Amino acid sequence: MVADGVGGWEELGYDSGIYSKKLVQMVEKYFDAGYSGGETLHNVLMQGSKADREIGSSTLVVAAFDQNDPNTLRTTNYGDSGYMIIRASKDKPQALERLFTSEH
């Protein structure tokens, strides 16, 4: 899980870093409670977001291996975040890029 508080809140007297840290804590709490029970990462993220009562905003990427198929990596993101997975191969590196404008 990677989060980054969104700037601009300082002008209003808030630290978005506090929001993003609390968001990570809440998503982790719901992940530990629900993901192994079949909850989707998206739902875990939404539950954690609703539980965060701090003022601010954040981007966030969550990734976890599927409980039923450990060869499958599940991901979800919040805000305009994205990620890239680079896999080594005998011929050439393979890359998978996930941008905030992509469907998942």
Image: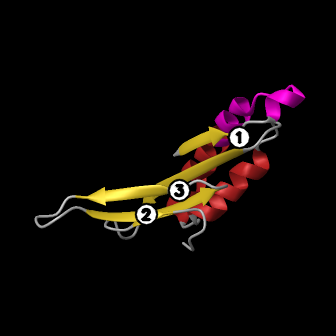
Question: 36 and 48: which one is in front?
Answer: 48
Segment colored magenta? 9-23
What secondary structure characterizes most of the magenta part?
A: helix
Kind of residue indicated by mark 1: Val
Residue drawn at (60%, 68%) of the image: 101
Question: Residues under labels 2 and 1: Cα distance?
Answer: 22 Å
Q: Which mark is drawn over residue 97? A: 2
State the residue position of label 1.
6
The secondary element bearing badge 1 is classed as: loop
- Give the image location of residue 41, x and y in percent: 57, 61
Compared with residue 79, is residue 103 higher up or lower down, i.e. above or below? Answer: below
Quarter of the image holding residue 14? top right
Residue drawn at (43%, 63%) of the image: 97
Question: Residues under labels 3 and 2: Cα distance?
Answer: 8 Å
Closer to the chain start, of discs 3 and 2, is 3
| Residue 90 located within the stretch drawn in magenta | no
Kind of residue indicated by mark 3: Gly
